[in-house]
Image (cartoon, rainbow, N blue to C red):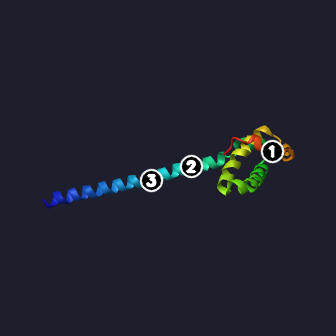
Amino acid sequence: MLHEIRNKFDNIVKTKIMNRNRLILFSTAGILLVSLFVSTSCNTIARAAAKYWTNKQIREFIGKCEDKSSIILGSENAKKYCDCAVDVVAEKYRNYEDVKKASLTDVLKIARDCK
């Protein structure tokens, strides 16, 4: 009888340990997937712009865009807007020097669908 109780107890403990290990495994996998998704999303920002502009030009455009638009949109919304705008504007102005010559109104018209 004592032997049976001990075996049942051992089985319960093993089951709990296995369940805990599964939980840890699935939690870790979930965290890794979320991290991968987030890092991929961040890396794909400005993917269209990267076809035409250098990283320095992209950073310059986004920096100036955020400086100007954050006054109206707020910091967080300006970041989202400019992350979109850089791609849309780069598709239209493949030469970065042309963007620098363009009027603010022209650039805003191009990026009007960004939010």
Cα–Cα span, label 3 and label 1 = 48 Å
Q: Nearer the viewer, residue 44 or 69?
A: 69
* Occupied quadrant, residue 21: bottom left
Q: Residue at x 52, y 51 (%)?
A: 32
Q: Is residue 26 visible?
A: yes
When asked about the image quadrant of residue 95, the answer is top right
Q: Secondary structure at mark 3?
A: helix
| Residue lying at 17% horizontally and 59% vertically, measured from the top left | 5
What residue is disc 2 on? 36
What amino acid type should be assigned to the residue bearing mark 1? Thr
Q: Quadrant of the N terminus?
A: bottom left
Mark 2: give few (<14), some (14-19) or many (20+) Cα within 10 Å. few
Say whether residue 53 is left or right of residue 3: right
SS for callout 2: helix
Which residue sits at x=60%, y=50%?
39
Q: What residue would you read off at disc 3?
A: 27
Question: Where is residue 62 drawn, in percent x and y?
Answer: 74, 51
Name the residue that disc number 1 marks. 105
Q: Nearer the viewer, mark 1 or mark 2?
A: 1
